[in-house]
Image: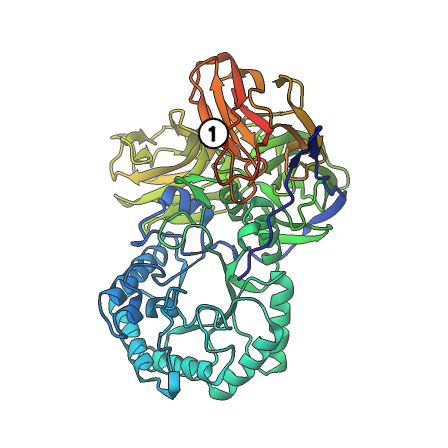
Amino acid sequence: MSRAAPPSRIVAVLLVAAAVFVPIRAEAADSTVTVNLAAPGKTPTRAGAGFLYGLTQNGAGPADSVLQPLRPTLFRGGGARIAGHGWLGDGYRAGTGYRVRVTSAIDQARRVTAAPYNATYHLLVSDVWGADTEQPANTVYPCDNGDCANWRSFITQLVTDVKASGVRVRYDIWNEPDGTGFWPRGVNSAQYFQMWNTAVTEIRRLDPAAVIVGPSYSGYNHGWLDTWLARTKTDGTLPGVLNWHFGNDPLADSNDAKAIMSARGVGPLPMTIDEYLFSQQQQPGYLAWYLTRLAPSDVSAAAHAIWSDCCTAGTLDSVLSNGQPTGQWWVYRAYAQLTGNLVATGGGSGVAVAAAVDQGAGRAVALLGNQTGQTGTTTVAFSGIPSWLLSGGRARVTVQRIPNQSPLAAPLIVSSAELTVTGGALNVPVTMVAGTDAYTVTLGNPIDGGTTGGPSIVDANTADFSYDANWGVTTGVADMYAGTANWSHVAGATATFRFTGTQVALRAVRDVDQGRMTVSVDGGAPATVDNYAATRNASGVVWTSATLGNGPHTVTIVNTGQRNPASTGINIALDRADVTAAAPPSIIDGNDGRFVYSAGWGLATGIADMYAGTANWSFTAGSTAQLPFTGTRVALHAVRDVDQQIIAVSVDGGAETLVDNYAATRNASGVVWTSPVLTAGAHTLRVRVTGTKNAASSGWNVAIDSADITA
């Protein structure tokens, strides 16, 4: 697979007589997208919430606290790049190289196919075999010279081992068999079909219920797929799932694949995309665009590709940074919050939108993505807004920006206000600061606090809560939020609630027949809560957490089986949770006047991938920039690129920290340095141009983007 050329760069050209800075102009275009909340469609499938090689070798990482909020549906793996080279490295037999890879795959599958994930695991058969692009030149591939015997032995061993584990997987037979480094024997060649047919026949002989995935081409190709479907239909070796990688538009590609299947008298087969996003597309704006195109398609699952952290780092390929969420993580989190029913959307030019409405959760959410790096203003035109989202004819409207940052503590709140809805319609302008950003627009009822006008309300019957088998649900309960009660009267019954924020208040029934429960956060000491009351209160706050660090947390609720002597029962009935989010950092553009620059700095405007489109730049050693601010922390955003030098950063005249802004791939607005937590009050950030650089850097540039101030 080829990698696209890096984006345009800020280029500083030093001439004999003068320094000339050449800015890159943004392509800003206004557009409109439509969201019709009165046209509900299918239940969201979370088709894009999948990951290729995103887990650690034994499947234990990443932690549940950062994985479960994404509500993943698909994982794919097979031990690629684990030392030993698989079956191939063992001399085409089941030795230690094979064993370590199949053990890794089974361990990963065991975790993610069980509750609470209940995801699908695609076992990449060719990776267990050893075809992970590191195979030697003298490799004997399956069915070379017409001999498929060893390949058949491998399949027999693999299926036998998987069946013995008791874990269910789907068999993805060969990765990218189209002339790539994984299969150099030719796309749709006679040998390929020998290999494919042998594997399918043997898998189905040993496990008739097995689901087979293929052909897993490296890209969507109409001609290849048409030929492949015709041949496998004739041979009786059609898969259970039709799969390909990448492609330009998942909605268009899936429609084309359905047309091929119809023309060939095949199917309809479920469709998956086991790899999507090239390396340069792995940023919030493009990710959100791809997910919005997946949402209305008939693709059942898709997996985020692996480029930077193959293959056991457990970072979901840099969706996490040192275990912490990045901008991409927050896009997946927003995607997971498209609950209830998808609604009709349309319009846009380079910008796409997917939206869902969920009365139980009390919200409507729209996710905006960007394919072309477009800036300017995109108007989200809502229509058909239901009355339950309104109070006094107004809705709480919150716009959040998800910048391309790593790590990112939380999305940035652009605006949150109560707006008047007229005739069920409302236009919400979203100014896209950088083409790599994603955005969400959330509508909530002001009486409930909306999404940021007060705590976020999470009904106990949504996917953020999970329950063991000893819980039931009752609907139509008039005095409870969304009319639902999740209840248990079994000692030891356990429920968990996962949220991101700084505090949570739990609401539950207090009544004459209620028992005692324990509540704990993040595995801490449990507190006992007595829900007995002489007078019923079905939705009052029964427990509130301490103030927590902003981030993902897990609340565990256990029915103790005990009760107040005055109570007639040991029932526990959960109503909802109120989640408080941290106030987002305030953003200070490098050109808004609060930054003070010495001589030796210039300004460029119209930079598409920088905040507010501006860059304050210097390549003069000794030049300084200072930012007085009031708060407890500051994070500096600056350009990282192939032509950037080293800066020195300090606070309040303290020791300087050297920050190397060289990077092989451009990131124009990421955080390059974050201060420690400071005492609340006035402080000064200082940036100094050192005049030194990484040996790999081609220039001496420094370009400041913005700063985030935490109150």
Which of 425 and 492 lies nearest the eye of the viewer?
Answer: 425
Q: Residues within 10 Å of mark 1 (few under 14, many from 20)?
A: some
Residue 152, by quadrant, is bottom left
Q: Which is more toward the observer, 221 or 581?
A: 221
As drawn, 190 above or below 219: below
Residue at 30% x, 76% y is 154
The location of residue 372, given as percent across then percent down, is: 67, 49
Q: Kindly state the secondary structure of the residue where label 1 is placed.
A: strand
448 and 336: which one is in front? 336
Residue at horizontal 44%, vertical 17%?
Answer: 678
- Specify whether residue 480 is in view: no
Of the residues shown, which amino acid type is indicated by label 1? Answer: Val
- In the rendering, at what x and y percent does residue 504 appear? 43, 31
Q: Position of residue 671 (x, y in %)?
A: 52, 32
Using residue 464 as the reference point, say whether residue 446 is left or right of it.
Answer: right
694 shown above or below 147: above
**Residue 604, image x and y in percent?**
70, 31
| 450 left or right of 461 in image | right
